[in-house]
Amino acid sequence: MEKAAGNLKRVYTVADPLIAGHIETILTERGIHCFVRNRFLTGAAGEIPPLEAWPEVWVAAEDEAVSQRLIDEVVGPPDAPVGNDWQCPDCGETIEGQFAECWRCGGRPE
């Protein structure tokens, strides 16, 4: 966490307001009260520094840890390692590790 306001903590910042809204929905469905700051500020980028206009998801300090775990489950932790390259068992194509399905035939790793 980089910023705190009272007993609130910022748990996620992203350029895309749709992703921020998705995170808000996930946390709310789990009973975590949260809000998105700067939801409609992206249009001001250029007038203010772009990072200042990015949507931020904020939660109560006591919900910070569980919120971060839920966010990591959805978007992955920052700098998540990419899996190893794999060979498609159906067509033999070499597929980069971040992909779960063969681009050529739709096969999946064993």
Image (spheres, rainbow, N blue to C red):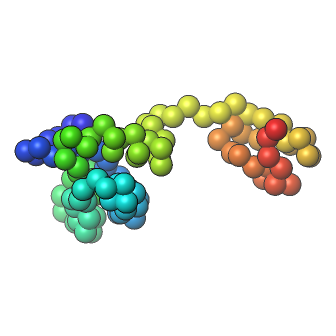
Q: Quadrant of residue 106?
A: bottom right
Position of 89 with respect to 62 (left or right) is: right
1 horizontally vs 73: left or right: left
Residue 88 appears in view = yes
In the image, residue 15 lies at what x, y percent? 35, 56
Task: Examine the image and state in which quarter residue 109 appears.
Answer: top right
Report which quarter residue 7 is drawn in. Answer: top left
Which residue is at the front of the view, 57 or 84? 57
Q: Residue at x 92, y 46 (%)?
A: 91
User: Which one is in front, 62 or 19?
Assistant: 62
**Residue 16 visible in this rendered orientation of the protein:** no
Work out whether 70 lies above or below 49: above
Q: Residue at x 21, y 37 (%)?
A: 2
Farthest right residue in view: 91
Question: What is the quadrant of the N terminus in the image?
Answer: top left
User: Residue 5's x, y, as percent?
Assistant: 10, 46
Q: Which of the two residues, 84 or 62, is positioned nearer the viewer here?
A: 62
Residue at horizontal 89%, vertical 41%?
A: 89
Image coordinates for residue 90, horizontal then vertical, percent:
91, 46
Q: Residue furthest left?
A: 6
Residue 11 drawn at (x, y percent): 28, 44
Q: Residue at left 71%, top 39%?
A: 96
Vertical placement of 109 versus 17: above or below?
A: above
